[in-house]
Every structure is written in structure tokens, then in C-alpha cells.
């Protein structure tokens, strides 16, 4: 985003699984979360979790049945149901290097920045109030946010007052350092605790941000690290979402636990965690249905998922990852604030930075939210989703080589 511009089925194999005859919770639009007793939250097909040897054995057998089932999920009714394309990116050799791809992906944001600030600051012009006001305006136009912008400009003004910055060229470099300083505390790659099996990652977000694709890419990265991974198709309101996750499962040789369209999402994820525990998988990644952050009844359903997971593992989910579309600008910040207030986030992933001139929202989020940015996405290829690093990001944004 630094848009500083001022311009006025496929066939399923045994790796892609489904659970038949799950309780139907109805469409997400029905509104309220299940308010029945906790035992009913996981649906009538939820396995027992008693601790006796006999019941433990039975639970293990049922989990194996869950993972072995070949019942197909209902096909998508129409392409319009999908908030993300069903197709998945094709792997390409990592020949150009991530910095080059990130620099290219941030082209729209950088173009606005170059036009807005480049001509103003490059060279050795005398610094005056007009230059500082121009910086402030361009940062706000880039969706850096009012609070982050004021903090940056205040720090620059202080340095000018101490005569640390004598001309616009020095100011240009100082601006880069201020932006880096804002982002560095938010560096926080996802680290899987090997002592926890399975490590449960719950992925949340509104419709169309790229949750399912992000899950598929994270699963591939974890597989490359030698970890065993399972996926839970918890977005039960879109048949296309289940199908898309199953495609990623086939490509990654990863088991996908799914149920029919309209099934209870909490029940699907509960079953998936049981299966992952029985198989001693390293990681379980659970997809969820997209929901508006402004709809409290839909947010309650996420709370239900977390309660249900805690029945099998009091610490689960170990990571609650919010996926944000960078192109939504300041609305992405609003989403982060409300999801965090509702379900307690532990990390963020910013996608689609390559398709927007509003990449500056990452600075607004970094200033407002004390949450680690786990990943950024700057393209559709597998390698275009990477752990976030502040210094290379700012360098790519400014076009540094």
C-alpha cells in the first residue's frame, strides 16, 4: 500500500476425506450460535472423550474411521458461491528470489510512493515545514493511518530539531528507518511447538481474503519442514471451500477431514482434532467460514469452535491466525481489532499486497495492534507467501536493491 499517489472434484483419494451424516447446523446466516449445553455443541456425532482405556481405544478407532471415510462432500452449486477461486497456484521454480518477487509485487504501492514522495525528497533540498506537511499527507493517503503518520512525522521533526537531518536526502533515509522501526516489533514467524501434538492453527477472516489458499500454502511449507499436517474443512457453508481445500490436500499429500455442506463447523473441527490426535499428527490447520466482523452472532460461532476444541485439548487452538486482504485499507485494521476482541488473535497474515496500492495499511496495523505479523502474500505462487521481515519489506517498498 504505500499508495502515496496524489493523482487527482477432482476425484478424492484416500488423502482427501469426508465425514458423512454430520449434524446440520443450518446456514451461517441463521444467526445465533448454538446455546445448548456444552455437550451438544459438537453435534450428536461427536466421539466420546472419556479417559478409560476402552473409551480411548474406541475414540482412536472412530478417528481412524473419520480419516478413512470416502464419502464425498456436496459439490458446489455454482461458481458464484466461492469467495476464492477453486484453482490453486502452480508451483514454479524459485529462481528469482523472494526479494525480487516482493519488490515486483509491491509495484503498485511503490509507484504511488515514488510519485508522491520521491520527487519531493530526493536530492539535497533544505527541509522546511512544507516538506513535512507533504510527507504527512502522502503517508495518510497511503493508508498508513493517522496515528502511525503522526508518530513518524513527530520523530522526524525531533531529529530535524536536533540537526540530525540536514537535507531532504537525509530525511528520505530517515523516513525509511522510521517505517522499519514501526514494523520490526511485529516480526514474528509462526513457530510450531514440537512438544504439542497436534499443534492446532485456527484460521479466521472475512469472505474473500484468501483463507483457504493461505492454509494450503502454509501446509506445503510445513510439509517441506518435515512435519505431518492435517486439514479441517470448517468452512461448511461453501461447498467450493471444501473442494478447494481438498485440492490443496491432494497436492500436498495431506489428509483433509470434511463433512457435507451446511454441517456444523465446530463438529467438523472437533472430529479433525480427534483424528489428528489418533494419528499423532504434528499440525492441524482448521479452515473456518468467512464472516463479517460486525456480526456478533457470527463471531459467537468462532467462540463455539474454540470451546469445542478445548474439550479435547485445553490449550487448543494454539494459534488463532487472522487473514487480512491488504486491498481493503483501513477496513483491515477494523477487522483485526474486532476479531481480536472477539476471539483473541495470536497472529496476522496480510495477503494480496501485490494487487493494491494500499500496502501502507501494514504500518497502521503494526502501530495499533500488538500482534505478530506471521506472513505476507505478494503473489499467487507458493513462494509468494513468506514469513514477514520488516527490513526487506521496507527496502522493497522503497525500491532499494
Image (spheres, rainbow, N blue to C red):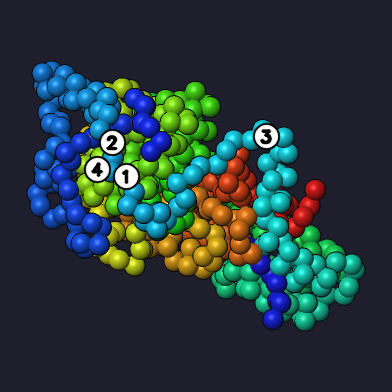
Residue 386: x percent and y percent? 58, 42
Q: Residue at x 47, y 50 (%)?
A: 85
Query: Label for residue 72?
Result: 2
Quadrant assignment for the N terminus: bottom right
Q: CA distance from mark 3 to mark 4?
A: 37 Å
- From mark 4 to mark 1, how far is it between C-alphas? 9 Å
Residue, x 19% and y 54% (percent of image)? 26
- Which of discs 3 and 1 lies nearer the camera? The answer is 1
Which numbered mark, 3 or 2, is in the foreground of this view?
2
Crowd class of label 2 (few under 14; some 14 to 19; many from 20; radius 10 Å) = some
Q: Are marks 1 and 2 in contact (CB under 8 Å)?
A: yes
Residue 8 horizontal/vertical position (percent): 69, 81
Q: Tell me the CA gap for discs 4 and 2.
A: 8 Å
Which label belongs to residue 94? 3
Residue 302: in sight, yes or no?
A: yes
Cα distance in 3D space between marks 3 and 1:
34 Å
| Marks 3 and 2, how far apart at CA | 35 Å
Image coordinates of residue 147 in percent, x first then y, are 56, 71
> Do residues under tags 3 and 4 come within 8 Å of each other at their CB atoms?
no
- The image shows a total of numbered marks equal to 4
Q: Earlier in the sequence, mark 3 or mark 2?
A: 2
Disc 4 is placed on an element classified as: loop
Amino acid at each position: 500500500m504505500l499508495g502515496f499517489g496524489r493523482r487527482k472434484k477432482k476425484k478424492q483419494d484416500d488423502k482427501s476425506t469426508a465425514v458423512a451424516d454430520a449434524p446440520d447446523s443450518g446456514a451461517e446466516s441463521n444467526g445465533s450460535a448454538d446455546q445448548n449445553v456444552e455437550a451438544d455443541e459438537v453435534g450428536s456425532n461427536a466421539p466420546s472423550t472419556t479417559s478409560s482405556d476402552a473409551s480411548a481405544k474406541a475414540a482412536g478407532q472412530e478417528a481412524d474411521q473419520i480419516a478413512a471415510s470416502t464419502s464425498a462432500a456436496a459439490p458446489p452449486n455454482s461458481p458464484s458461491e466461492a469467495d476464492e477461486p477453486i484453482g490453486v497456484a502452480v508451483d514454479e521454480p524459485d529462481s528469482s528470489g523472494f526479494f525480487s518477487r516482493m519488490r515486483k509485487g509491491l509495484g503498485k504501492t511503490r509507484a504511488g510512493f515514488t510519485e508522491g514522495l520521491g520527487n519531493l525528497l530526493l536530492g539535497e533540498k533544505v527541509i522546511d515545514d512544507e516538506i513535512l506537511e507533504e510527507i504527512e499527507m502522502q503517508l495518510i493517503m497511503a493508508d498508513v493511518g493517522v496515528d502511525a503518520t503522526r508518530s513518524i512525522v513527530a520523530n522526524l521533526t525531533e531529529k530535524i530539531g536536533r540537526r540530525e537531518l540536514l537535507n531532504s536526502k537525509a530525511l528520505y533515509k530517515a523516513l525509511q528507518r522510521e517505517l522499519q522501526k514501526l514494523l520490526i516489533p511485529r516480526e514474528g514467524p509462526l513457530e510450531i511447538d514440537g512438544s504439542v501434538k497436534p499443534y492446532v492453527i485456527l484460521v479466521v477472516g472475512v469472505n474473500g481474503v484468501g483463507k483457504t489458499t493461505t492454509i494450503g500454502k502454509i501446509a506445503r511449507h510445513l510439509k517441506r519442514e518435515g512435519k505431518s499436517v492435517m486439514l479441517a474443512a470448517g468452512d461448511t457453508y461453501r461447498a467450493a471451500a471444501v473442494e478447494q481445500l481438498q485440492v490443496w490436500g491432494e497436492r500436498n499429500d495431506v489428509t483433509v477431514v470434511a463433512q457435507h455442506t451446511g454441517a456444523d463447523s465446530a463438529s467438523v473441527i472437533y472430529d479433525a482434532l480427534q483424528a489428528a490426535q489418533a494419528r499423532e499428527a504434528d499440525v492441524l490447520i482448521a479452515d473456518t467460514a468467512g464472516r463479517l466482523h460486525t456480526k456478533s452472532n457470527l463471531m459467537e460461532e468462532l467462540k463455539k469452535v474454540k470451546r469445542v476444541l478445548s474439550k479435547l485439548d485445553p490449550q487448543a487452538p494454539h494459534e488463532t491466525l487472522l487473514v487480512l486482504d491488504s486491498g481493503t485499507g483501513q477496513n483491515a485494521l477494523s477487522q483485526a481489532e474486532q476479531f481480536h476482541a472477539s476471539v483473541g488473535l495470536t497472529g496476522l497474515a496480510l495477503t494480496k499486497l501485490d494487487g493494491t496500492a494500499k500496502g501502507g495499511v501494514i504500518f497502521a496495523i503494526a502501530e495499533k495492534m500488538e500482534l505478530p505479523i506471521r506472513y505476507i502474500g505478494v503473489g499467487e505462487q507458493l513462494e509468494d507467501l513468506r514469513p514477514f521481515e520488516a527490513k526487506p519489506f521496507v527496502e522493497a517498498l522503497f525500491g532499494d536493491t
